[in-house]
Amino acid sequence: MKIDGSTAAIVTGGASGLGKASATALAGAGVQVTIFDLNEEKGETVAKDIGALFCKVDITNEDSVLAGLETARTAHGQERILVHCAQTSRGRMKTVGRDKENGGFKRYPTEDYAFSINGILVASYRMASLCALGMASLEPLEDGERGVITLTSSAAAQDAQVGQIGYGSGKAGVNGLVLPMARDLMDLGIRVNSIMPGIFATPPMLGAPEKVLQNLAASVPFPKRLGKPEEFGSLVLELVRNSYFNGQALRLDGGIRMPPR
């Protein structure tokens, strides 16, 4: 897709981490960016820094998303780009494990599992389908292209570790959306891809002890470091620009394959 100052984008989770890097890369390329996030303070700061618009949006609430889309479209017009980085999930726990406090065994609660699937998989469908609905009415560009959707999965979609049943299956579901959605939308000229980041230097990860970070970096085949958020943003920009990327789930992980633990 050829992008210019009239191209609009929605970036969820744009107040920090991978979303912030994506919003920064798009804004730097001249795209009119709207950030969706729950963190008003950080979201407003990032938006001001990169010349974007901020909307407080809860991706798990359809009314909240619709209100955010209305605000973004009033300011910038219908978006041609969606980068969905936001997510919510709950707990790291085995499907069934030992209950050290009470003896016997306990399981990962169904309610926690449903919360994670709603915050990862259902929210991804919500954002993608609502944006695609709007993109469908746009005038086509070269090759008949109307829009591009990039979802955020994870390396855990393919090699989730012990205790990642909710997160891993939710992210695997995101990859499962990609091909059928790309096929659903092919006649409308809307592309769909996902990125599976490995271990990245995002704020939650950088909160870990230094020794843990060193061990994680050493586990990456090459380069032996955590991924930089701007490397994720760079791939987001390439997926927008390169119209032959469609229906793909791409690993961005330095070649790492996560062990069981």
Image: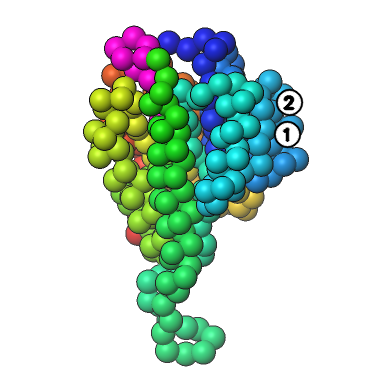
Tell me: residue 230, above or below residue 61. Answer: above
Whether residue 122 is visible, yes or no, is: yes
- Image quadrant containing the N terminus: top left
Q: Which residues are magenta?
A: 140-150
The residue where tag 2 is placed is 48
SS of the residue at dot 1? helix
Q: Is residue 173 above or below residue 179?
A: below
Q: Does residue 163 show up magenta in the picture?
A: no
Residues under numbered marks 2 and 1 in contact, where contact means CB atoms less than 8 Å apart: yes
Of residues 28 and 186, the one drawn nearer to the viewer in this rendering: 186
Q: Is residue 146 magenta?
A: yes
Above-or-below relation of 73 to 210: above
| Drawn side of residue 123 relative to residue 210, left or right | left
Instruction: Check disc 1 and report the residue beneath it.
Output: 44
**Residue at x-position 52% and y-position 48%:** 62
Crowding around mark 1 (Cα neighbors within 10 Å: few <14, some 14 to 19, many 20+) is some
Q: Where is residue 49 drawn, in percent x and y? A: 72, 24
Given the current orientation, which residue lies at the most extreme front position?
137
Residue 53: give x, y in percent of width and height: 66, 27
Does the image show residue 213? no
x 40%, y 45%: residue: 125
Residue 97: which disc?
none
Q: How is the image coloured?
A: rainbow
Q: Nearer the viewer, residue 200 or 148?
A: 148
Give percent across and percent down for residue 93. 45, 68
